[in-house]
Image: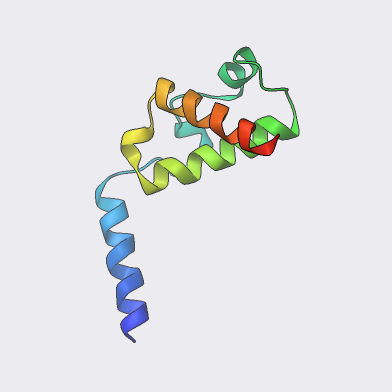
Amino acid sequence: LCEDESAVVKFDRVMEQDPPLSISQLAIGGRELSESGIARGKDIGNVLAFLLDAVIEDPRKNTASALLDAARQYMEGKK
């Protein structure tokens, strides 16, 4: 029961921050990622999913510059 309560409290805390809940709500999209040098296709989709997870955890990261930096770091980690 305590674990369930903890999950509810965490969910409520996240929702109070009004995070983006879909990729379309991110400050950047596939076009910006492609323009930054990330290959179109599967890589873009993987990066966008990663970025969505990041802004759900911390909605303050939903800025173009922060997301592009995070995308570059994500791709560097894949090399």
Above or below, 48 relative to 16: above
Position of 4 compared to 70: left or right?
Answer: left
* Residue visible at 30% across and 44% down in the picture: 18
Residue 54 image offset from top left, x and y in percent: 45, 43
> On the image, which quarter does residue 25 sit in?
top left
Q: Tell which of 60 and 24 is nearer to you.
A: 60
Across and down, in percent, residue 68 comes to 50, 24
The residue shown at (55%, 41%) is 50
User: Coloured how?
Assistant: rainbow
Q: Image point 61% across, 24% down: which residue?
A: 30
Front residue of 13 and 37? 37
Q: So how many labels did they put on this image? A: 0
Give me the residue at 38% from left, 25% from top: 63
Foreground residue among 41 and 25: 41
Q: Can residue 22 be seen in this view?
A: no
Which residue is most to the bottom? 1
Q: Is residue 5 visible?
A: yes
Residue 48 locus on image (x, y percent): 57, 35
Q: At which x and y percent is residue 10?
A: 31, 63
The quadrant holding residue 61 is top left
- Quarter the C terminus occupies: top right
In the picture, the quarter occupied by the N terminus is: bottom left
Image quadrant where residue 45 sits:
top right
Q: In this view, does 66 lie above or below 11?
A: above
